[in-house]
Image (cartoon, helix red, strand yellow):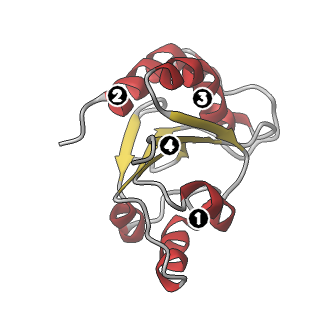
């Protein structure tokens, strides 16, 4: 049995898209002390194969724009949810394809594979700062994500 893997994704030069990296830095030590593996990375799609292969449980934390939630709100998605609609994120592009590739290669995908999206305002502007609306929510977002990750799986 492998430790659960938490992947915090983002892009350090794109405004709100860096929120996954920020939250990852805030939670890394705490989650690792609770027995989870944590990676904070700037990779997408098929490049995640090496991280998820052989894992039973993988949670990805990343920015998302659905247009249906307030800035800073957390949206939990399954791979099936990602197939049904296409949230705007450079990182979500490729997760369903990654899982399909694993099946084609006869690799076993994680039994528990979830995405925790953080609704953002502008993930495309080149900036090392997140939007003000998101910045005011960072501590709340980190605590809410920790609670989701640490909740017992039913």
Decide: is 68 above or below 104. above
Tag 3 secondary structure? helix
Decide: is 122 above or below 148. below
> Which of marks 3 and 1 precedes in the sequence?
3
Tag 1 secondary structure? loop
Q: On residue 25, which mark appears?
A: none
The residue wearing badge 2 is 150
- Quadrant showing the C terminus: top left
| Front position among marks 1 and 3 | 3
Q: Position of residue 147 (x, y in %)?
A: 34, 24
Q: Residues within 10 Å of mark 3 (few under 14, many from 20)?
A: many
Name the outermost residue toward the left: 154
Q: Which residue is pictured at 45% across the width and 28% down the height?
A: 35
| Front position among marks 4 and 3 | 4
Distance from the alpha carbon under mark 2 to that under mark 1: 26 Å
The residue wearing badge 3 is 24
Q: On residue 5, which mark appears?
A: 4
């Amino acid at each position: 049995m492998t430790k659960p893997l938490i992947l915090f994704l983002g892009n350090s030069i794109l405004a709100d898209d860096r929120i996954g990296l920020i939250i990852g830095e805030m939670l890394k030590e705490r989650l690792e002390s609770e027995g989870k593996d944590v990676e904070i990375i700037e990779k997408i799609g098929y490049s995640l194969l090496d991280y998820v292969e052989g894992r039973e449980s993988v949670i990805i934390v990343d920015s998302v724009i659905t247009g249906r939630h307030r800035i800073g709100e957390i949206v939990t998605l399954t791979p099936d949810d990602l197939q049904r609609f296409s949230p705007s994120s450079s990182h979500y592009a490729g997760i369903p394809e990654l899982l399909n590739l694993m099946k084609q290669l006869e690799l076993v995908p994680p039994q528990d594979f979830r995405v925790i999206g953080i609704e953002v305002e502008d993930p495309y502007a080149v900036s090392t700062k997140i939007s003000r609306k998101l910045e005011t929510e960072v501590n709340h977002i980190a605590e809410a994500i920790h609670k989701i990750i640490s909740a017992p799986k039913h």
